[in-house]
Every structure is written in C-alpha cells, then in structure tokens.
Amino acid sequence: MSENTLHASTDRAHGSRNSRRLRTAGNIPGVVYGEGVSPLPVSVDAKSFRTAVSGDQGLNSLIDLDADGQKFVVMAREIQRHPVRGTVSHIDFQVVDPHKPVVAVVPLHMIGDAVEVRHADWEVDQQLFNLEILSRPDLIPTHIDVDISDLKAGSAIRVADLVLPEGVAPAGDTDISVVNTHAGRAAKTVEVKP
C-alpha cells in the first residue's frame, strides 16, 4: 500500500465562522486523534486531500500527515459533507500503527452468473454492499469479490462464506447475509396455479 504525504496546518482557530473562512479559502478543517495522541485541530488543502484519497484504496489509504513538523501516519476516518453541495466540510484523521490491525470498510463486488437461480426463475438479491474488516493497513483490499456462480434457488451467501485474502478477517457478525435468493414474479405465478 502506497502512502501519500499530506501537509496540515495546526494554527487554525476554533469556531464555525473560522471553519467557514477556511473552507472558502480551499481548506478543510479536521482533527488528528489516536492512541497516545491528544486531539490536534488541523486544516488541510482540499485538493491535496482529494489527491491523497483518490487512489484504489480510497479512504483506506495510509497518509503521512505532516502537521507543522509533527509527523503522523493516519487514515481518514470520519468525513462530514455539506448537506447540499456534497463537499467535504470536516475530516477526522485517526493515527494508526502500520503494523497493527485496524477496522476498515471495503466494498463487495458480485461476480459470476447464478445460472441455476436464473433457470428456476428466481432472483439474486444483494443485501450487503460493504463489509467491515479487521486487517493491517497494508493488507486492506480495494474490494472483495462475492462469487455467485454456485448459488442455488433458496440459498444464500453469508459473511462466513466469503473468501477473504490472507490477513483479512470480518470485524462483525459472520452470520449476516451478503446475497439472498427469492422467487421471481414468474416463479410466484407458477406456485399460485392449482
């Protein structure tokens, strides 16, 4: 996993008026927090931040944050957006140890073709689109594939059934359905007939 360098300023003033001024000037207010670190208010350049998280890893990217000489390895955790414009209005940077597991959210991609489900006039219904995982930052995958090729009518794929890369484990309940199947309109019509 490649690390991006991001420069931050620690001299930002508190308050909503000052935060608005920062955003107008093209900066985003934020805070750095983590184990052994007192919360540190910072501001970062909006374009530089977009560049730092625009790679394949997205928000799971490791960022070398240089806050006026104080160096931190962080991940962008909580991102607040403007309710109308959708622009980033605040960022929480969590200090991480690159050698210790962290919780991350990774998208799930359905692959394959559930031929048996289709031939039975049933439908595939994806229930879960992202998965919380526990992994070292350098092992976080960009996505996890969910192969539905062997899916049968009336069956499901649960988190426990997913094939995860080495060093990656689910962070939550493994009994949650990722993909379900249910009778389609044509199958329901056939069942109703005497």
Image (tube, grey):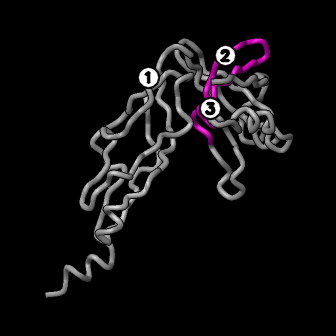
Name the residue rendered at 46%, 25% in the picture: 135
Q: Which residues are magenta?
A: 57-79
The residue closer to the viewer here, 136 or 46, is: 136
Q: Secondary structure at mark 1?
A: loop
- Tell me: 191 left or right of 36: left
The residue closer to the viewer here, 65 or 25, is: 65
The residue closer to the viewer here, 136 or 15, is: 136
Quadrant, the N terminus:
top right
Q: Amino acid at mark 3?
A: Ala
Whether residue 84 appears in magenta in the rendering, the answer is no
Q: Is residue 183 above or below residue 109?
A: below
- Tell me: 167 left or right of 13: left
Q: How much space separates mark 1 and mark 2, taking CA atoms?
A: 24 Å
Whether tag 2 and tag 3 are in contact, CB under 8 A, the answer is: no
Question: Could you tell which of marks 1 and 2 lies nearer the N-terminus?
Answer: 2
Q: Position of residue 186 (x, y in %)?
A: 31, 79
Q: Say which residue label 2 marks.
A: 72
Name the residue rendered at 61%, 27% in the picture: 75
Name the residue rendered at 32%, 48% in the picture: 157
Give the number of marks.
3
Q: Secondary structure at mark 3?
A: strand
Q: Say which residue label 3 marks.
A: 76
- Tell me: 140 left or right of 189: right
Q: How much space separates mark 2 and mark 3, taking CA atoms?
A: 12 Å
Q: Position of residue 108 (x, y in %)?
A: 47, 45
Q: Secondary structure at mark 2?
A: strand
